[in-house]
Amino acid sequence: MKTIKNSNKIVFFDIGGTLVGAPNLFSYIAEKYKSLQRDRIAEVISENYDNMYYNALEEKFLSVKEMLKISLKEASLKLNIEDLSDLAQTYYEELYTNQSYLYDDVIRVLDILKKAGVKLIVLSNSDSDILIKELKALNIYDYFDAFIISSDVKSYKPSDTIINKALSYCEISKKDIIFVGNSDEDVISAKKMGITSVIIKRWNKTINISSDFTIKLLDELLEII
């Protein structure tokens, strides 16, 4: 078993696509419609959601549930399909509490880090009620020492508000702090915090901003620490 030489470390983890996998949310919701144009429905919901997300970075904060509800309402009007917006929260919770799964290497690596005394912190763009349920259902909630979740902070990565909240947990030298994620937002967040960025590429997702390290398996993180 790999041992950690210096346990005085902090590791921030993104969740979705980093530690936990799940079907695509927009495709999952599109399957709920009676209409057969499900690919188009998923595309429109995704476009609506992305537009609101990027606006929420600069303007009024909306939770994931709120953005989904508005996205479904707008899709129903644009495509002249049934309005399922009142079920947005149900579908969101359904997917992430019943359909999500851990990647094979997660428990093994979290166990090593936790036993070594490394401080583990979640930094996630999610709604906290759903995310906490998901982590508990997957039996990894207790590995973490703290949770910084966008719905609690009213801010999404990489906005300054959530970054400043994360920095409040950085009570050791920044050279001993790592952020593991799977997106440009995660790299930007790490750079803003002045800490080491690690991108894990579970699949061929395009990352446009260079990270300090890129890994394919979470086990490789142990070599970096």
Image (spheres, helix red, strand yellow):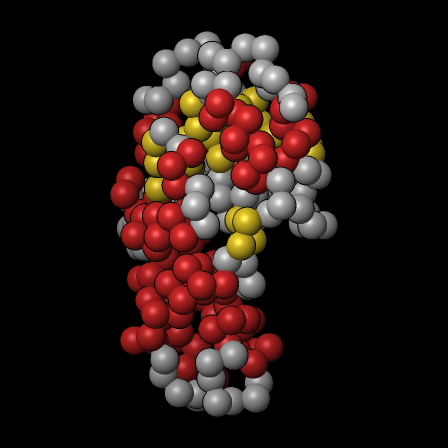
State the image coordinates of residue 185 (x, y, percent, origin top left).
52, 40
Identity of the residue drawn at 45% across and 63% down:
98
State the image coordinates of residue 124 (x, y, percent, origin top left).
42, 42
Q: Quadrant of the C terminus?
A: top right
State the image coordinates of residue 167 (x, y, percent, origin top left).
37, 23
Q: Is residue 168 left or right of residue 104?
A: left
Nearest the eye: 152 or 60: 152
Q: Is residue 70 visible?
A: no
Identity of the residue drawn at 37% across and 63% down:
93
Q: Is residue 49 left or right of residue 213?
A: left
State the image coordinates of residue 187 (x, y, percent, origin top left).
56, 33
Q: Is residue 56 left or right of residue 23?
A: left
Tell me the quarter of the picture where residue 106 sits: top right
> With respect to residue 30, does 216 lie above or below?
above
> With respect to residue 195, does 202 lie above or below?
below
Q: Quadrant of the N terminus?
A: top right
Q: Is residue 139 visible?
A: yes
Nearest the eye: 146 or 161: 146
> With respect to residue 188, does 1 lie above or below?
above
Identity of the residue drawn at 44% across and 87% down:
81
Identity of the residue drawn at 58% across and 16% down:
4
> With respect to residue 178, does 130 lie above or below?
below
Tell me the quarter of the picture where residue 184 sits: top right
